[in-house]
Image (cartoon, rainbow, N blue to C red):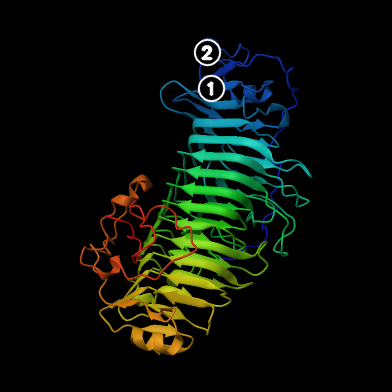
Amino acid sequence: MRIMGSGRNWDTRVLVTLLTGTLLCGNAAAKNFYVAAAGTDNAAGSQAAPWASIARVNRAQLVPGDHVYFEAGATFSGTLTFGPHHAGTPQSPLVIGSYGSGRATIDAGNSSGIAITDAAGISIENLRLIGSGRRRNQGSGIRAVNDVHQGPHLSFLRINRVEVSGFGLAGIFVGGLATDGTQDGFDDVRIENSDAHDNVYYGVLVGGPWDDDHSATVTSGPQDSGPRPGYSNRNIYIGHTRVWNNLGDPDYHLNHSGNGILVADTDGAMVEFSSAWENGKLDTKSEGGPAGIWAAGSNHVIIQSCESHHNHTGQSNADGDGFDLDGGVTNSILQYNYSHDNDGFGFLVYNYKGAPHVHGGNIVRFNISENDGGRQMNGGSLAIFSDGDDVSDLEVYNNTIYSNKAAKNTTPLLIGNHVGKMNIRNNIFIANGGVPVISQGVPNSQAQLAGNAYWSIGASLRIDWGGTTFTTLSSFRIATGQEQQNGKAFGFEEPPQLSGMAQGITIGNPDKLSSLQEYRLLPSSQFLVGGAVLTGLNMGTRDFFGNPLRKGGPFPIGADAGTR
């Protein structure tokens, strides 16, 4: 997935009007203000005498601790704008929300719904934000940017129980956008219990000036020029958030569009209990496409307990992935995720040329992929490769990968170019229709396989390794030295003895992923033991299904690896 520069010359301030009022003195008492359809802007703004418009809110001299409530069930037109003189504090945030039963709607028309510039200490909750749609809107539902040159990270932003749709850029965008490349964005951000759908470039984006804001985040500045000193954002949490039908821009060919959730240019983030589906269908970038849930140019990102399915790409070989640890990602983890029926890779680990950081120290574990690679030709359900510096120091263990895309020659495990040191252990790889269980196109002695289970349905086993095809595990082991550990042979070539597979089940609620009845090991399965010994790893506490892990072995194979 290629990270490139901005294509459109959007003005970063077109959609933002900074308020000119000065902050009231520090001892001013915080107040509640109300906005109602039957209100008047000459009123006091109380619940008994509410204001009528967003324009009146924008003129108000709000102080930390103030609450602004819009009438639930009513619609208000315009863009709420907040600048540095209207910021709250983590201890006393400025709160924007609804009152009454349900949610108020902010109709932004062709602009952004809520535009926050160089301000934080703000909590947005229980609102619906709508734009005028893909062909007309040029904003984001919530757009929070820090573009202060050499400024500090802005601390504390909360987005909870919001729905954003119909925006031409992102449903929610948070990030640092200083045009001099200063990496000062946001710290302590939580996006929770929210829906972002029917937007163009992203459902949710956290990014910065070098993460390829893809015109959606409206930047210009240094692009793809090698190592960076730091990150624009810190301490980001995205949870219980759904993103769908963010279809992309068919007229934009410089980079990808139609993404679900992307965390970029960030040090320290967690995405969990979230789901992405039916994104990316209109993307037409030929060399790099969108993904459901992914990270790029970031450090210490955990993506866990998420479901990403039926995501698309408009190009036959341009992503459309379920999950991705992309260029310049370090010390990050994909775990407990369920990927299925995506056009592209289920799980991708990839580095692009000119990535802002090295790519290494990552882990992919206890995930399930089913029927991914539905549009890619010669793709993989789990793919590892690079077009730049090596993908290295990677641990891949206890995943269950089933590929049923024989017509597309989609292999369960694809290892491509520029791959450095990695361990691939105790995974289940199942192919259907004679495609290779593993496809490794170039000789690579640094990838070490041990304790994996391989099975081909309806055809003989096939392992393509460095230009040679092997039809038995034993011949592969003897010729390559793979599937051995300390002189002991490992690995299985036999039916997986699973509770079921390939049923195309969508859970729909990531809190209930462990209820998936497929891909559980039957009591008779040899895969309950016999895996390679995993030492020196902090494997976490549980498997995909929530079972606690055994301490010290024996080591099971696949995503069902816990105690019974």
Residue in front for this viewpoint, 426 or 76:
426
Residue in front for this viewpoint, 311 or 458:
458
x and y, in percent, of residue 504 in the image: 29, 60
Residue 390, located in which quarter of the rendered image? bottom right
Which residue corresponds to the image point at 57% horizontal and 17% vertical from the top-left?
Answer: 32
The amino acid beneath tag 2 is Gln
Earlier along the polypeptide chain: callout 2 or callout 1? 2
- Give residue 69's mark: 1
Which residue corresponds to the image point at 29% horizontal and 50% vertical from the top-left?
Answer: 515
x and y, in percent, of residue 518 in the image: 27, 59
- Give residue 47's mark: 2
Task: Give the SS element for disc 1.
Answer: strand
Residue 41, located in which quarter of the rendered image? top right
Left or right relative to 519: residue 365: right
Verify CB contact (< 8 Å) between mark 2 and mark 1.
yes
How far apart are the alpha carbons under marks 2 and 1?
A: 9 Å
Which residue corresponds to the image point at 56% horizontal and 12% vertical from the top-left?
Answer: 46
Q: Residues within 10 Å of mark 2 (few under 14, many from 20)?
A: some
Residue 111 is at least partly visible in this image? no
The residue at the far left in this view is: 524
* Quarter of the image where the C terminus is located: bottom left
Which residue corresponds to the image point at 68% horizontal and 23% vertical from the top-left?
Answer: 59
Q: Residues within 10 Å of mark 1 (few under 14, many from 20)?
A: many
* Quarter of the image where the N terminus is located: bottom right
The amino acid beneath tag 1 is Tyr
> Does residue 199 sit above or below 370 in this rendering?
above
x and y, in percent, of residue 121 in the image: 63, 31
